[in-house]
Image (cartoon, rainbow, N blue to C red):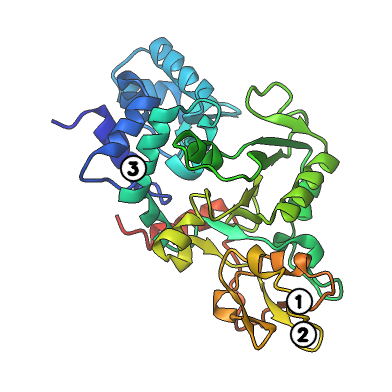
Amino acid sequence: MINAYDRLADELNRIPNGFPRTDSGVELKLLAWLFTLQEAGVASTLSLEPRTIKEIAEKNNSGEAEIKSLLIGMVKKGLIDIKREEGKGFLFHLIPFVVGFYERQNAKIDHEFAELFEQYYKERFHTIMLTEPSVHRIIPMEKAIPVDIDVMPYEKASTYLDQARSWGVLDCICRVQKRLIGQGCQHTVENCLVFSPKSGAFDRSENIKALTRKEALDILAEADREGLVHSINNAQTEVYYVCNCCTCSCGVLRGMVEYGSENSIARSDFYAVVDKDQCTGCEACLERCHFKALAMVDGICEVDKACCYGCGLCVTSCSIEAISLVQKGPEELSPPPIDDKAWRKERAGSNPQ
């Protein structure tokens, strides 16, 4: 007999982000950790399209007061989203597992949940990264971008920070999860940036530390010093976070390292080149490259263009400026979807259920 968790799992898997099922059923254990059975039943009747309390109550054969209480409770737990629309009042809608309600649990997960996620990651979650367009996209270190070229606004973190009116930082869910199972790396945990077009958006948040714009830029600079890759959701607009990722813990980049998925993350509009006359062969750049795109040949660094994702970490490590980023030619450029809706449409057309 199909229960509420099965129905919710199936509904989540219909979202373009995906929530693939497993033979072991570990995904149901994850949902049971997050949702009560009653919550799962109501959530399984939601979709990405916002619905009124009345519509949701009718779908669940329940009273509006009871349904409203459940929905508000799930919003507070970070499991679904709420919006307000003139003439309709409050509307509620489902959100994906990733990127979605999983990331909102970083202050709540325990060892049990972390172990369940790791099992799910190895069984099926990593297959989410095989579908195009990629969930995440790399943006280069801004100081590595040549100053004498026109750069698309979506390639610069400052574009998104400048458009925001609130900035915040929270713990990286990936590093929290890996540390809980005893496999943590040494990188900073509190460095996932979020921002909002609404003033004071994070002032009362329990899990997000409100920042100034300068403090947000300082975190990006520190990520560069640590050798972390900037990544964002794979769209030109509606970008509200910057992750600072490593191959040790990041659920996206691990797909490349552990499963060889080149589609795990979309590349930037750049790739690195080396001035062989300038390079001294110091190898400082090699350890900064997460993508194994650099190698020493006859004492000089060379770039494997096919492996370069254009993050710029090698550029910022080179004190003599022997490495630089070069913008791809028009035939090589692949602009990201214009917004999240366009991303979902493209993704839905290629998602292997």
The residue located at (79%, 78%) in the rendering is 322
- Residue for badge 3: 119
* Earlier sequence position, callout 1 versus callout 3: 3
- Which image quadrant is residue 64 in? top left
Of callouts 3 and 2, which one flags the residue occurring earlier in the amino acid sequence?
3
Residue 124 visible to the viewer: no
User: Which structural element holds mark 3?
Assistant: helix
Q: Which amino acid does the dot numbered 3 rest on?
A: Gln
The quarter holding residue 145 reads bottom right
Give the quadrant of the N terminus: top left
Q: Which residue is mark 2?
A: 275
Is 68 placed above or below 97 here?
above
Q: CA distance from mark 1 to mark 3?
A: 40 Å
The answer to whether 304 is drawn above or below residue 213 in the figure is: below
- Can the viewer see residue 115? yes
Query: Along the line of sight, which residue is nearer the eye, 149 or 53?
Result: 149
* Above or below, 58 relative to 299: above
Q: Is residue 138 above or below residue 250?
A: below
- The residue shown at (47%, 30%) is 80
Q: Residue at x 78, y 34 (%)?
A: 211
- Residue 69 location (% of width, % of height): 45, 13
- Name the residue beneath numbered marker 1: 323
Callout 1–callout 2 Cβ contact below 8 Å: yes
Question: SS at mark 2?
Answer: loop
Residue 286, located in which quarter of the rendered image? Answer: bottom right
> Residue 19 location in percent, x, y?
35, 45
The furthest residue to the left:
1
